Image (cartoon, rainbow, N blue to C red):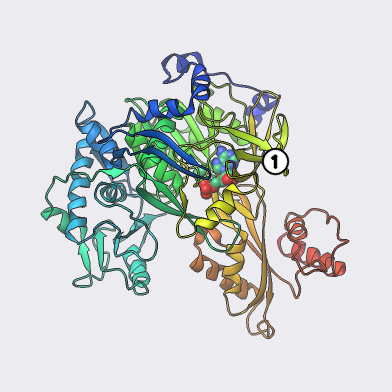
Amino acid sequence: MADLKHPELEDLLREDRAFAPPADFQARANVADPSIYAEAERDPEAFWGRLAGELEWSRGWDRVLDWQPPHAKWFVGGKLNASVNCLDRHVRGARRNKAALVWEGEPGDRRTLTYFDLYRQVSAFANVLKGLGIKKGDRVGMYLPLIPELVISMLACARSLRDRMNDMKASLLITADGGYRRGQIVPLKQVADEAVADVPSIKNVVVIQRGGQGMPVHIKEGRDHWYHRLMQEAPLACDAEPMDAEDMLYILYTSGTTGKPKGIVHTTGGYLVGTYATAKLVFDLRDDDVYWCTADIGWVTGHSYVVYGPLANGATVFMYEGAPDWPQKDRFWALIERYGITILYTAPTAIRAFMRWGTEWPRRHDLSSLRLLGSVGEPINPEAWIWYYHFIGGDRCPVVDTWWQTETGAIMITPLPGVTTLKPGSATRPFPGISAEIRNERGDAIEVGGGLLALTRPWPAMLRGIYGDPRRYVQQYWSKWGSGVYVTGDGAKRDADGYFWLLGRVDDVINVAGHRIGTMEVESALVDHPSVAEAAVVGRAHEIKGQAIAAFVTLKDGVADGTRSTKDIANELKEHVVKKIGAIARPDDILFTPDLPKTRSGKIMRRLLRDIAEGKALGDMTTLADSAAVEKLKANYEEEYG
Ligand code: WT7
């Protein structure tokens, strides 16, 4: 990272700097009083109950928590609707004509939807869904660019359907003719048509017109419907269905240590309370904010902090469809200036790319509207933190480094910007009511020092299970140290001030640009290719993305027969992984080897492969079957990628 440092930052990086909340920020903050921690600690259930009471319930809960470790029910007996809390509640009050979504497309087209507009469109689209015969238990798939209709579709589902989910057994797919990316139109409908051909469960496809004129779209009679036509005919009012607090809200798939991604189940009441409370207190949301979380809505960050958390707070949410470097590398800064964005929540990988592009891009713009910055997805190195603080935040905006997971649903370890003194690189302390510990393998809590991060108390937005695999839920998260302790899979250390410093995954999960990828998942995809005999995948450090994917592959006999170059074969394998998993899983390096290094008992030695991929000296090889082969592999790797 050394070459990404900037001379202007030397002073800020010089020592262990700490940043107390600026006085003017603190004076107006939603929380400025540290006693909130003691309040939550005294009686966590009362604390969560107080925040839940700020939402609208059609029936109050009988009990805040029913905890049968490791199974929790929150707000037992309560009934509410997520879309009512994100829309109706505001429409009935002073926020009726406030901007809910402010959107800019990549080509520069703009739209603003007030809370009333959004309420009307969500209600109308909920009626469309009903008209298409979608009912409780049906699944709705969405394959959409970052456009307002994505938010409308999500909230329409939350308004009228229970138990929806987005696996491949969906009966309805919502897509668009196209979406913009770096000046090109991605033909989404065409891609969707290919996918739908393999999914007989899909009965209807709703197509949003986004690509514009001249975009050839094949409409299959009886199956495909234009969104704008359906919306013209839809009644504008739709009563929201009261959901049980524990009714499923959605499932998101995420990578684990084995080959198969896990469907993480989130429910309505606790999830909404968790995202509402953290959005309010961590982002210090106020009515005059323009809040921008740059995450894609398809990931958990977008679900919790583009849609549910901020809209439950009645915030103005900014959304941008396209790439940060289109048409130029200052697009984000131009947007902040044009829309007066006050809160920016993005990822370290993006910040490191901005650092690489240089300070001239943000310097061209007036960023003085910003008052708070956030970071999420992976550890933020102090250089990137300070760069963000200085060049984007103008030394004026607190930086909230927020640690959480798909499974936790909401932010868990984070500063409260009006309370917490910040240390660059530390996510600081557990959110009020959250209990986190550092433990050693045996399960002893470590007060000061490094170990494994554990959560020792249930929390409202916690996952309720892994879809279709109740045993794995218990084994994966709640078995290492007893059924009441959640194992995060992250390493962390705690300093003498009680601050947490996240160190990254300790399992076979790697973090590429803030996205979790299981090494086993990539291995399975590689081995699935007819040319591959065996594959081992490891993460290696990468300057911008945090980690990159290195694959060591043994080809089947006769594949490398000289008719194709190894480069062509490697590219074919990379594309195969992209097709099986997605672009984020494309291996950066593929090295072919006649053998993988194994112990005498036949286990692949990933530690050695990691050392090779990171260009480190090879460690202990005494348990290795063939050490000369490893030296050779290292030399080959260095030749190819060094
Ligand atoms: C993993 C969860 C949280 C939404 C986006 C990713 C890493 C996340 C931080 C942070 C250090 C972080 C952890 C975690 N992570 N935020 N602020 N500091 N590490 O969600 O795909 O479920 O990944 O991301 O390793 O376990 P996810």
Label 1 SS: loop
User: Which kind of residue does numbered mark 1 sit on?
Assistant: Gly
Classed neighbour count for the residue bearing mark 1: other residues with Cα under 10 Å, few (<14), some (14–19), many (≥20): some
**Residue 501, percent from left and from top:** 65, 34
Q: Residue at x 50, y 29 (%)?
A: 433
Q: Which quadrant would the N terminus be assigned to in this image?
A: top right
Q: Residue at x 25, y 39 (%)?
A: 84
566, above or below 447, in the image: below
Question: Is residue 352 among the parts visible in the rendering?
Answer: no
Disc 1 marks which residue? 443
Q: Residue at x 55, y 60 (%)?
A: 585
Q: Quadrant of residue 453?
A: top right
109, above or below 552, in the image: above
Q: Which quadrant would the C terminus be assigned to in this image?
A: bottom right
**Residue 499, percent from left and from top:** 64, 28
Is 13 or 194 nearer to us in this picture?
194
Q: Residue at x 73, y 60 (%)?
A: 606
Question: Is residue 583 among the parts visible in the rendering?
Answer: yes
Q: Quadrant of residue 428?
A: top right
Is 80 or 186 nearer to us in this picture?
80
Q: Is residue 363 left or right of residue 60?
A: right
168, above or below 299, in the image: below
**Residue 220, percent from left and from top:** 23, 72
**Residue 306, percent from left and from top:** 38, 41
Is 554 or 124 nearer to us in this picture?
124
Quarter for ligand 1? top right
